[in-house]
Amino acid sequence: MYVHFKEKIDRVIAELVIWFNRNDLIINVDKTGFMSLHNRQSKFPVKPQVSCNKLNLKYTAETKFLGIYITETLKWNSHVQSIANKLSKLSFMIKSSNGILSPYMIRNVYFTKFQALPRFGILFWGE
């Protein structure tokens, strides 16, 4: 089964390379990684060696894609922590700007920045 799986991966990578070449795009192998999606109970997740243009791609357990953190177990802990950190900074900024900015401007900052952060990518969250 592992050999068949590896052959499929190699075939897909070859098709991707052809598509990139046809569209005059370059694959930056240093910034390209692969991830093995699995549940937390998997004691030995499948992590085959994947190569592109004869260079090995690095395995990653977590990546940021379009502003959303994705982990190999599809848990949201990293993404939630990232949002919490951003919200904390914005909360401090809003609190510090009290007395400097008008209530109208503070309200605008709240709705455009603070409230937008947790909503971003909500479709990917499965809500």
Image (cartoon, grey):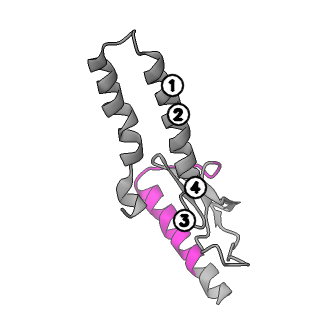
Distance from label 3 to label 1 (Cα)?
Answer: 30 Å
Amino acid type, mark 3? Leu
Is the C-beta separation of discs 2 and 3 under 8 Å? no
Front position in the image: 86 or 38: 86
**What residue is rendered at 39% in x and 51% in y?**
121
Instruction: From the image, tell me which residue sits under label 1.
Output: 92
Instruction: From the image, tell me which residue sits under label 2.
Output: 88
Closest to the camera, between mark 2 and mark 3, is 2
In the rendered structure, which disc, 2 or 3, sits on the residue that comes first in sequence? 3
**SS for tag 1?**
helix
Is the C-beta separation of discs 1 and 2 under 8 Å? yes
Neighbourhood count class around disc 2 (C-alpha, 10 Å): few under 14, some 14–19, many 20 upward: few
**SS for tag 3?**
loop
Distance from label 1 to label 2 (Cα)?
Answer: 6 Å
* Residue 111: x %, y % from top left: 31, 33
**What residue is rendered at 55% in x and 44% in y?**
82
Amino acid type, mark 2? Ser
- Determine if the magenta segment contains residue 11: yes
Residue 74: numbered disc: 3
Amino acid type, mark 4? Asn
Closest to the camera, between mark 3 and mark 1, is 1
Task: Please provide the residue range marked out in magenta.
Answer: 8-30
**SS for tag 2?**
helix
Residue 77: numbered disc: 4
**SS for tag 4?**
helix
Relative to 103, residue 42 above or below: below
